[in-house]
Amino acid sequence: MEQNLTSATEAELEKDKVVADSDQRMGQSLAPSSEAGCGKDKAMADSDDSDSEDEAQQNLQLESLQTELAANPSNYDAHLQYIALLRRTGDVDQLTIAREAMSELFPLSPTMWLQWIKDELSIDTASRPEAFSRILKLYERGVFDYLSVSLWCDYINFVQEFDPIVRQCTPTGISKTRDLFESALTAAGLHVAEGNKIWEAYRQYEQAILLTIDDTDAQAKEKQVQHIRSLFHRQLSVPLADMSSTLTAYKTWEVEQGNLQDVESIELVDIYPHVASSYQKALEMYNARFHLEEQILSSNVSNSERLQHYMNYLKFEQSFGTPARIQVLYERAITDFPVSPDLWLDYTRNLDNTLKVGNIVSNVYSRATKNCPWIGELWVRYMLALERGHASEKDLSDVFEKSLQCTFSTLDEYLDLFLTRVDGLRRRMTSTGEQDLEYKIIRETFQRASDYLSPYLKNTEGLLHLHAYWARLETKLGKDITAARGVWESCLKICGSMLEAWNRYIEMEVELGHINEARSIYKRCYSKRFSGTGSEDICHSWLRFEREFGKLEDFDHALHKVTPRLKELQLFRIQQESKSAEESEKNTKRNAREKRKMGSDITEEQSSYKRLRDVGNPEKAPEENKHQVQNSSQVTKVEGVNWKNTKIDDNPSEQQFSHEKNRAYSDHCTAFISNLHPTANYEHIRNFFSDVGGIVAIRILHDKFTGKSRGLAYVDFMDDEHLAAAIAKNKQKLIGKKLSIARSDPKRGGRESSNPKTLKEHVHTTNHSSQKGSLSKETEDTYKEDVKDAKLSSTKPGNDNIQLKGKNTFAVPRNVRPLGFTANKPKAEDADEKPKSNEEFRKMFIR
């Protein structure tokens, strides 16, 4: 088993060697050549033209990539292409700037760090202090991003070669190198497949120090021997690849020290029983992990399968509960899968449960948010980890601001970020007492959250929770009741159709003992429409409030207000149930009729004749046809106008409400609104009249062909009091346009609206909001267009007007002339056409 794993490791080493050789060749392309200053040979002279063309093409590519990165700095592939192109051109300064810009946004892979370091080494002499310091920082940054044994080994070799203190083997240099090796062992010493590289390099360094000690200094020499022996013992107790080779090397070394006669003759247990026991335990642990190591190192599996193998391996390690070994395996996994959100979430969750605080946790979160910045949960937990570690306000603020620059998949993630930030500020404020400074930041954070989320989270529980939290902190921490009311008023503008928003506002006032203010809120909302049983609930809530807090006069006043409202709602509910029953019955009949139709042998011609006969004679039509005719006349009556080029599209909820309550509210007072903004919808109109209340239905007129709003609407109110209040808002602006609001007579809708003359007279006589009884210019202009459309609705090009009169003309199609009509026959203006009876129409259709 060890041999197979060693083969896999050797394959990985060979791969690293190929990459290193490639990097070396690329690095040499940046290095100044000693032959560059010599005379150019003929072949190079002949290629000048092609080189200039390549250079021009590279410049164009560079400009294109610079433009792309300026517009979209988060384009990872563009960064890679830009850096690769700069390496080919040899622009060292610009290359360094490009790499710094990328490292600010993304963690760099170990290969990219090695390329960067080698490019720096090819330019500067590392022995110079400033160059050594700069390259040393690059190594430190590189080993921070991802776990890489090869990068650690390169880092150690660089220090041993170029650090003058280390090369002189001074006590300070030896201590510095040992600290570096210990850091490497902490990071990768438990790496099952490659960790032995660091252990071996550490032993070789200590053995080299042993050779520098004078033989006369027996004490120092013995101390160094014990140090090397301790390293062997430590390594033999760790499950690593090729453990048998390590054991053989140890025995050989002990023979050199004179403690063993022969490597094969004496067992380790005879000299160091505790070492033999540790080695046997480590070997068993390695054998238990061998098949898992083979799976994650195999090159014959897909990425998804390898990731699953890592997850299985992690579960296996977690069952033993060794935090250091689990962390190293997580680091190996994220090195292979750096943009796996589930892996980072699992890793950070494990650290939160084990380490909880410390630089290790915050560093892992920093890397997690760099690799997966689109995961809001990582940012939230990052801020919580910083707070547990007592990070400064600046660090917390910086992380919060960075998180807001990311793009998340849901708005709830943004909301969670804002709330987490407020939670932390609140906790710090209550613990430090810096109320003036801290609460100002809390208020600003709430305001930013409301400004950003309100357009997208209207009438949602999340936005309501945000404002409720805000209002509570205004009263408890800010000590500003006026500001708290302002928060609720702002919330009602966005979530005013939610009953819970009104209830929470009232609860705040009641909790503070402001009974009159709570009563005024009830007066504002009792007549509003809420989903479900909300309308009834608010009425009952008002009565309960007055029983518990008000006087008898207050209770009587509330009872006087809510009683007709409750009756109205009860009637509406009865009609809803009745309609549901009728619809169910009608659907049942329709299904039965369709089944009979499928089994019958009646031809299509006979069916058409029967339908025409039934339409011509309503008395013999089926009961459901009568019902449909009756309903169609009701809809026309509610909608009020029926122009050819105009249709009235109700908000589905409003349409259902108005149709079902047609009989109950046939006497409603109606306001006619003109000069509406084309984008105005039902919610805009409802909010505009929110202070008036009493709205029963809203109908906006749309063009039949384009579907666009005509700037006209009808609003039904339950009584004259609400209508008068609505008309008082005449000339007020809605979406930047002044509305013209007038009283409308619903009894004069229907047939009269098709006559342009009566239409204009109707508007002039019903415009109570105008002092002189005339239309405003905007309203008159609007009605000129409506009058024009009204003419078109009853006229065809090249023909005279056709005016249908009488009670039995409903069966005539709107856009089809009656049979026997003479197109060019003149007709006196005062002559009345004799209406045809139902029997005459029936004969016309079946002739």
Image (cartoon, helix red, strand yellow):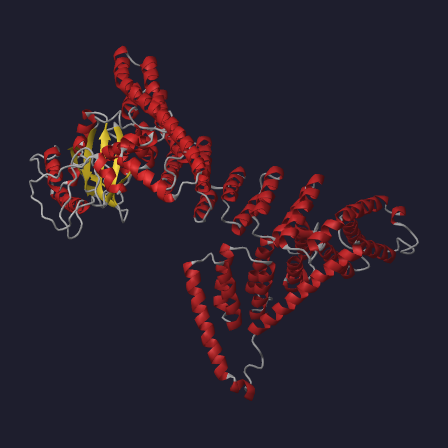
Given residues 69 and 388, the one toward you in this image is 69
Return the residue found at the far front: 847
**Residue found at x 46% / y 41%:** 393
Q: Position of residue 510 (x, y in %)?
A: 35, 20
Quadrant for residue 320, please give it: top right
Given residues 180 and 504, the one toward you in this image is 504
Q: Position of residue 491 (x, y in %)?
A: 34, 33
| Screen quadrant of the C terminus | top left
User: Is 57 left, or right, of 829 in this rendering?
Assistant: right
Q: Position of residue 304 (x, y in %)?
A: 62, 52
In the rendered image, the vertical position of residue 457 relative to residue 70, given as above or below: above
The reply to whether residue 192 is visible in this rendering is no
Given residues 221 and 400, the one toward you in this image is 400
In the rendered image, the vertical position of residue 484 relative to residue 162, given as above or below: above
User: Is 777 left, or right, of 519 in this rendering?
Assistant: left
Q: Position of residue 48 (x, y in %)?
A: 49, 83
User: Is 326 left, or right, of 115 in this rendering?
Assistant: right
**Residue found at x 79% / y 57%:** 3
Quadrant for residue 562, please give it: top left
